Amino acid sequence: MEKEIIIAIVGGTGSLGRGLTLRLARPKIRVIVGSRDQGRAQQAADELNRILGKELIVGKLNSEAIKEAEFIIVAVPYEGHEQMVKELGNGLKNKIVVDAVVPLRKGKPFVPPAGSALQEAQTILGLEIPVVGALHNISAVDLQDAHSSLGDVLVCGDSDVAKQKVMEIIQLLGARAFDAGPAANAYIIDVVRCA
């Protein structure tokens, strides 16, 4: 790693966001915990820094967090997914968006009208902003346990360049990443995650 990698996690105060932050935060990787509430974002960052024993994480409003980052991981519950992507909108230009959202209704997977959360986000953002689906099969519990093996992660999307960069980030988590094809395959990965 030659240059610093900057990753913003939208929904970073939730269990998935916290787990991802703990696994990613290290020298040369700057993780920004994003939230709709600045106080909650900073509180989460402070707690995670205490766990790590280092000051590696900062907390910011989502709109501020995405300004600095090259990679934006969306880790919100599905109920808030569409609204969050719309709110971030143009602020995601020249970024790679990683959609880790699994559409669930009362704990059960379902196929949203767009086909998947990834396809929903891609429709909202347009084709100029690459959206990659990944991290659907890793539990927040495993992410927060430094000794837990994360296994394999399927990555899909319509930009091969973006997928390759995301697969490199996933390897930094301690998981193996595999190209699972185009964005249209995301609904299969969402359903398999919950099976």
Image (cartoon, rainbow, N blue to C red):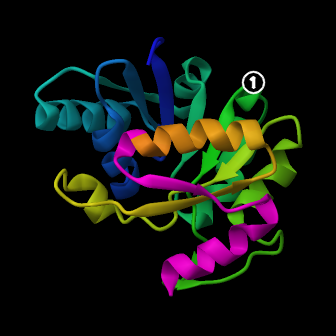
Image vertical order of residue 15 relative to residue 106, above or below: above
Q: Which of 83 and 135 is in front in this view?
A: 135
Q: Nearer the viewer, residue 101 or 41?
A: 101
Whole-percent x, y for residue 60 in the image: 44, 26
Image vertical order of residue 142 relative to residue 27, above or below: below
Question: Horizontally, is 119 left or right of 77 in the view?
Answer: right
Q: At x 50% / y 32%, what residue is drawn? A: 8
Q: At x 39% / y 24%, what residue is drawn? A: 29
As helix, strand or loop, the secondary structure at mark 1 comes to loop
Q: What stretch is highlighted in magenta?
A: 172-195
Give the residue type that dot 1 points to.
Asn
Whole-percent x, y for residue 96 in the image: 67, 35
Question: Horizontally, is 92 left or right of 71 in the view?
Answer: right
Q: Which of 126 and 166 is in front in this view?
A: 166
Q: In this view, which residue lies farthest toward the top?
A: 3
Q: At x 71% / y 74%, what residue is drawn? A: 187
Examine the structure image and report whether residue 178 is included in the region drawn in magenta: yes
Q: Which of 151 and 28 is in front in this view?
A: 151
| The image quarter in which residue 156 lies | bottom right
Whole-percent x, y for residue 124 in the image: 83, 49
Q: Is residue 152 visible?
A: yes
Whole-percent x, y for residue 42 in the image: 31, 30
| The image quarter in which residue 183 lies | bottom right
Q: Name the residue under label 1.
A: 94
Image vertical order of residue 160 relative to residue 116, above or below: above
How crowded pointer 1 is (Cα within 10 Å; few <14, some 14-19, many 20+) is rated as few
Q: In which quarter of the image is the N terminus?
A: top left
Q: At x 46% / y 12%, what residue is drawn? A: 2
